[in-house]
Amino acid sequence: MRGLFIQTYGCQMNSSDSDRMRAILAPLGYESQSQPENADLILINTCSIRDKAEAKLSTFAGDIKGLKIDNPKLKIGVTGCVAQQEKEKIIQENPFVDFVIGPDHIDDLPEILENFENSNFQFVRTDFEQETSRVWKTQTLLTNPGPTAFINVMKGCDHFCTYCVVPYTRGREKSRPIVDIYDDVVRLTDQGVREITFLGQNVNTFGKRAGESLAELFFKVHEIENLKRIRFMTPHPGDLEDSLIECFKELPKLCSQFHLPFQSGSDKILRSMRRFYTKAQYLEKIAAVREARPDVAFSTDIIVGFPGETEEDFEETLDVVRKVRFDNAYSFTFSPRPGTRAAEFKCDLTEGQKTDRLTRLQNELRGIARELHNQEVGKIKEILIECPSKKDPNFWTGRTSQNVPTHFERSLSTARPGDLVKVKIESATLTHLKATPALEN
Ligand code: 5AD
Ligand code: SF4
């Protein structure tokens, strides 16, 4: 047995890549460890979406470099988006790193590690096979699936929003065939998975080239008896078609949660971001989804302080927040990313102005989320039990269809992880709900 420690940064796509690495390495005798000190292989799965995320690589690398003194056999690999972007530079700046591999080379890990048995050369593997020549191994691999799981349905992005690094680190869009994804869902539900989140960087253009669509995928997997809940992320408002909105009417297993990043409420800034929709069009899409499924909870991503953003532009962003009333939101100040168009844009805003806008925005978002959660008190909701609560293991943690974490005391029912149970919401905070089992349990 050999110890494996994976440090994961970034989005769900990266977390699911880490799961895949764990599953690929398990048959080679690598067992996951909770501390890097116990590892013979440390993988740092990096994110470069914003500069703060990127900086985490050097902090963590600094923390672990001394471990090689105690364990000379220890190998350290850097994977993920920073690996793809910085390539050799990572080894130049961190000479104790043994290898750097891009997201397209996760499946090469066994071969890479075997090579190390014979030599100790540091190396970098970050080429992209944009065309179809390289087989993208698609089966979802998980070592110990719980009641919820993620399935990647596509990778890459063709949009080139001017601020975003993803098209450079993850390449062009490529979708998996529905038949392969269907097989994944059957296999995972046979292993006890009840809720699946279908992932893609621009998930609503899934299947475009093959004449398939996300709506078609949802209709197909909806028939699988043991699959109880369907979620997806992240769609682009400009590509949001009626067929996907219809799914909220037709498919009860599709959860009442919609993550739809709007980034900015100003049409001028949206143009400069190359987002291909206006504020009015965004609000129309929201209204259409609400009409199809009135209890849907919206979440979003917002960037403040984009180059050229005036106070009036920022007010437009606040206006969208007030009109939509998001249940949850990820908000960031603009961070210039190497190689992107917006990194060259002239920006007159000071860091102070940017963080001031972010604070105002986040206060607004928090107030609304608190109100929305308070409105849930007294209601009966269905939750899928996931695991014991991390804070207090005497409580179960589950989620409502709207994706709000909900806790209730274990001793009050016989329910188990993977069960869907009705609960009564007793109290609410900004981030979660507290409940008791409803009578029919
Ligand atoms: N600066 C700030 N935020 C960014 N995001 C992506 N790129 C940047 C950037 N350069 C945010 C967007 C996106 C989310 C994943 O991260 O809001 O939707
Ligand atoms: Fe970060 Fe984007 Fe890479 Fe995900 S795909 S890890 S969000 S840079």
Image: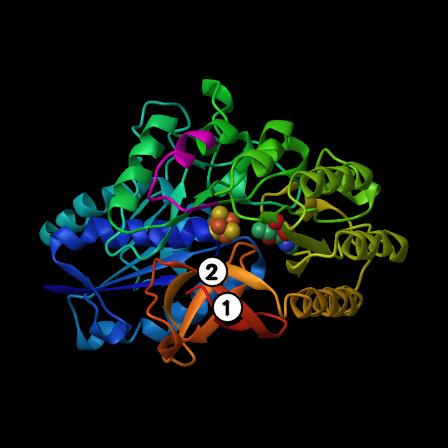
Above or below: residue 344 compared with residue 372: above
Label 2 crowding class (10 Å Cα cut-off): few <14, some 14-19, many 20+?
A: many
Residue 371 or 339: which is nearer the viewer? Answer: 371
Residue at point 78%, 53% (across, down) = 347
| Residue 406: image tag | 1
Badge 1: how crowded within 10 Å, few (<14), some, or many (20+)? many
- Is label 2 in a helix, a strand or a loop? strand
Q: Taking 200 as reference, is 257 left or right? A: right
Q: Are marks 1 and 2 in contact (CB under 8 Å)?
A: yes
Q: CA distance from mark 1 to mark 2?
A: 8 Å
Q: Is residue 404 above or below residue 254?
A: below
Q: Which residues are magenta?
A: 219-230
Mark 1 Cβ and ligand 1 under 8 Å apart: no
- The numbered disc on residue 383 is 2
Viewport quadrant of the N terminus: bottom left
Q: Is residue 225 magenta?
A: yes
Could you tell which of marks 1 and 2 lies nearer the N-terminus? 2
- Counting from the top left corner in percent of width and height, residue 10 is at 48, 57
Residue lying at the far right of the rendered structure: 312
Check disc 1 and give the amino acid type. Answer: Thr
* Residue at 70% in and 54% down: 303
Question: Is residue 336 at all visible to an observer of this figure?
Answer: no
Residue 126: image quadrant is top left
